[in-house]
Image (spheres, coloured by chain):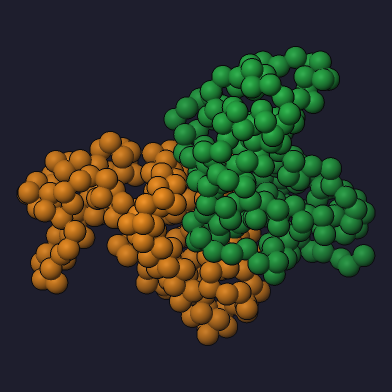
Chain colours: A green, B orange
Amino acid sequence: MSYSTDPRAARSREAMLTAARELLVGEGPDAVTHQRVAQQAGVGRATVYRHWPRPEQLLLDVMSGADLPLFKNPETPVRPWLHRQLRQMADELAVPAVAAVALTLHQSAIWDPQIAHQRDESIKTITERIHTAVRSAAANGEIETDLAPADLSAMLIGPIVYRTTMQMGVVSDDFIDRLIDSVGTWHRK
Amino acid sequence: MSYSTDPRAARSREAMLTAARELLVGEGPDAVTHQRVAQQAGVGRATVYRHWPRPEQLLLDVMSGADLPLFKNPETPVRPWLHRQLRQMADELAVPAVAAVALTLHQSAIWDPQIAHQRDESIKTITERIHTAVRSAAANGEIETDLAPADLSAMLIGPIVYRTTMQMGVVSDDFIDRLIDSVGTWHRK
């Protein structure tokens, strides 16, 4: 799964990941086949095979961090942006197939070093992105908080994962507000 | 897996579940065999077979709610008791084998109605127990909170599940204090 630094190759890789992600969220993991991804991304099937010889590998990349659009490019004010990101994450995890893939990946990672590595990268990426966003909120006076980066993401994401994949319940906008409130003192801007 | 209401049978069932839980936390899921459980609980192997013809079924009961000792019988003051319960849960989930079993059960539940039923009972039990404890803390003036029962448990347990099974990190006592702080306004007693 090495890929070149050629910008065109990087773009087509991103297009395939986006296509796979849309198929996963829309129709579940069985829809993430080489053929469907190729079709939806507008590339040849051989291109998908070249990047991901096995579909599980593609699914793994779809669910993992570096290419994940979530929590990317924070906007000011940070709070409504953070709310939207958590909303999107909750909506995706509310799809049973997506929740199942997420749990399977985390479960497999406990025993499989390659998947563990990808999980660690993914978790690190999300932690860093959330921390970057909250740091910029602190810099512009929106929030005061002394939480460590890993604690911030655990308190924001953990309850959403628990609600969607374990309590099998709905994440309301009020609940997201509660979670955002829980990580510091916010000041109206 | 029907069992009689004979108190002796209930006691031996509880002894077997305790034994299985100790084996799971101490040595991982492979140690939860009919023979080891029988030995450790001081019952005949046939008794274990009679209750749980398949070991997966036993493992499922061990991980699920009704028999779970966690969050049972709240003590006053509630806060230190709650801290101890969350500490114990975090310590158990810190064992990779226990985390793996928990994730596997939740993942299986997404597709298997029987496991889903058990998951729902388990989640309901934990939610009720935590709610009971927090309600008694509110009654004795320890806490003010207006969080719904399901939100309380998601904000206390979700971050611990995320930290132990996904971030693969340590749950410090400070972090537990943060979580407890996040569910309401506590008053020193």
Say which of B146 and A169 sits in front: A169
Say which of A131 and A125 sits in front: A125
Say which of A122 and B32 sits in front: A122
Residue B60: image location, x then y, percent: 31, 51
Residue under the point 53% across and 47% down: A97
Residue B189 lies left or right of residue A73; in this view the side is left
Quarter of the image where the N terminus of chain A is located: top right
Q: State whether residue B42 appears in this view.
A: no
Residue under the point 58% across and 35% down: A32
For residue A79, which quarter of the picture?
bottom right
Quarter of the image where the C terminus of chain A is located: bottom right
Residue B93 lies left or right of residue B59; in this view the side is right
**Does B4 sit above or below residue B1?**
below
- How many numbered marks appear? 0
Residue B34 lies left or right of residue A36; in this view the side is left
Residue B183: image location, x then y, percent: 62, 68
Residue B28: image location, x then y, percent: 33, 38
Residue under the point 22% across and 44% down: B55
For residue A50, which quarter of the picture?
top right
Residue under the point 64% across and 72% down: B184
Residue A101: image location, x then y, percent: 52, 41
Q: State whether residue B35 appears in this view.
A: yes
Q: Which residue lies furthest to the bottom in this view?
A: B139
**Does B12 sit above or below residue B27?**
below
